[in-house]
Image (cartoon, rainbow, N blue to C red):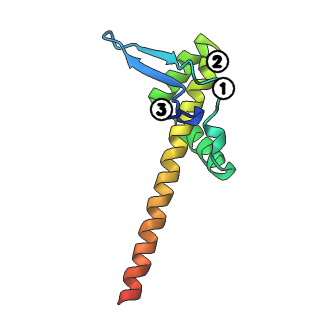
Amino acid sequence: MADTVHAADVPPVEYTVNPDGTETITLNAEWNDQFRFDSFPSKIREAVSDEYQRNATFTEVRRLRLAFELGEPLYSAVWDDIMSKRAEAMVTAQRLLEGSTERVTELEHDR
């Protein structure tokens, strides 16, 4: 039986660094405007958007500028990829924090 690939599992773009140091962005044909970022809770999306405005990396800005020059739908796909990765990292960090808080509570209870 073949595995089913869901739209949310398909990275919208692939980034390739060329030998001359430039970067190529390739749109995944299966993306079809399926925004992964929209699947996160609104509080996460707001926090990620705020954090991005304050702390965008050089690589993120460079990729968005290149995608902007190349137009739609590439720009939307790159934006979704950047924001989704940040949202995933934020959710993971929150889960780790919650897990460590629970562990501290258990240790305090065991005293």
| Residue 54 rendering spot, x and y as whole percentages | 56, 41
Indicate left or right for 18 with 45 as reference: left
Marks 2/1: CA distance? Answer: 8 Å
Indicate left or right for 23 with 36 as reference: left
**Amino acid bearing label 2:** Pro
Q: Residues within 10 Å of mark 2 (few under 14, many from 20)?
A: some
Q: Are marks 2 and 1 in contact (CB under 8 Å)?
A: yes
Up/down of 91 relative to 59, above or below: below
> Which residue was labeled with disc 3?
2
Q: Secondary structure at mark 3?
A: loop
| Residue 1 rendering spot, x and y as whole percentages | 47, 34
**Amino acid bearing label 1:** Asp
Q: Which mark is residue 73?
A: 2
Indicate left or right for 3 with 7 as reference: left
Q: Secondary structure at mark 1?
A: loop
* Quarter-of-image position of residue 51: top right
The residue at the point 45 percent across, 27 percent down is: 59
Seen from the viewer's position, the closer of residues 31 and 6 is 6
**Amino acid bearing label 3:** Ala
Q: Which mark is residue 33?
A: 1
Marks 2/3: CA distance? Answer: 29 Å
Going from the N terminus, do you reach mark 1 or mark 3 first? 3
The residue at the point 41 percent across, 68 percent down is: 100
Q: Nearer the viewer, mark 1 or mark 3?
A: 3
Up/down of 45 relative to 10, above or below: below
Quarter that holds the C terminus: bottom left
Q: Secondary structure at mark 2?
A: loop
Q: Nearer the viewer, mark 2 or mark 3?
A: 3
| Residue 45 rendering spot, x and y as whole percentages | 64, 45
| Residue 56 rendering spot, x and y as whole percentages | 52, 35
Which residue reaches farthest right?
Answer: 42
Going from the N terminus, do you reach mark 2 or mark 3 first? 3
